Amino acid sequence: MALLVCAPVALVVSALTRRSHRGPRAFAWGPLAGLATAGLALLLVGGFLAPVTVREDDTRFSLAALAQQSPEPLPAVPGTADPGRPLDSATATAALSGLPALMPRPFEAEEPSQPTTRVTFQPESCDDVIAEGAASAPAVRLEKAYSVTAQGTVGDMDVNVVLESHTDPQDLSGIDREVAACSEYRLPAVGFDTPYWDGTMRLLPNTGQPHPSRVVSLTQTAVKSGRTAVFVFRQNTVAVGHNVLRIAIGYGYVETPPTATVRTAEALMTSITADVVRRLGR
């Protein structure tokens, strides 16, 4: 491949020099052109030309370098009750009762997925931290899932809301460990040209939230039929005393980010967080 790409350069040099040199001296340019081609090929294969050509992870790093849109500030929500109190099933259900009214139209309520096997992350340190976080069992857990029709995406936009209540007050240090261990990760990509999804995990600012919170942005890329497929996953996590609210919105696209969908996802994330926290304070 390298010789094929470099050959046109050698042919042009050889053609130009043969026009200015006639006779036996012209034949000397053949080996010189060959040496120039071989030298350029070695530089290309060795990665020394990566700044002006391409390398394996260029897509992942260029996407990670894009300016991430920061979520809009979340308003403080006054409440008469203690929003951090432990919940039972009834109060958890009431806290999520406003979700259907917030969903963009058209949408469908779905059964939350229950995977039978856990996906293995690479590197191993990342997988260990994620497995550790998934091992904690809350006293009460309620999950709602929705599928929202979105422009410019492959399939729909998936919205998943989980409300957990624990016997002890919660912090979000586990998320900090996940982001530190999984800043760059890989997941198996079945049916793609590339064997893996190359992913990045980043913490984003979340100003204005009165409770401890984390906003995590995940971007995964793989190649399908020669085109770059991208999956974007945004998760907001808010710790309110004994309770943890997790909102995850994900969508996929090919090469071109869907601007309208990005704005819709940001607005939806803000409205869900404010509504559930408000209802917890009742």
Image (cartoon, helix red, strand yellow):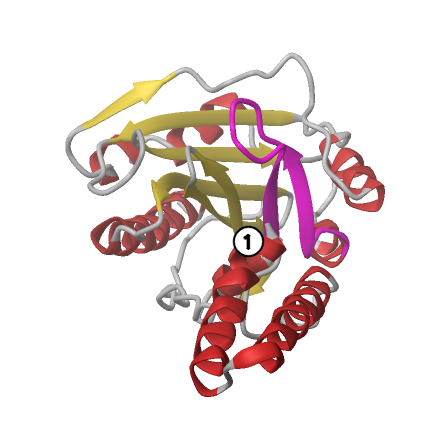
Q: Residue furthest top?
A: 116
Q: Is residue 27 inside the magenta stretch?
A: no
Q: Where residue 244 sits: x, y (%)?
A: 58, 43
Q: Residue furthest front?
A: 23
* Point 43% across, 49% down: residue: 277
In percent of width and height, residue 115 lies at 60, 16
For residue 112, side relative to residue 101 (left or right): right
Quick one: quadrant of the C terminus?
top left
Image position of 232 (left or right of 175): left
Give the quadrant of residue 98: top left
List the residue tagged with mark 1: 4
Position of residue 140 measured from the top left corner of the image (x, y, whole percent)? 61, 26
Residue at 73 percent across and 27 percent down: it is: 137
Which portion, as a residue range, is magenta? 181-200
Rendering coords of residue 13 (x, y %): 50, 77
Looking at the picture, which amino acid does disc 1 mark?
Answer: Leu
Residues 140 and 220: in front is 220
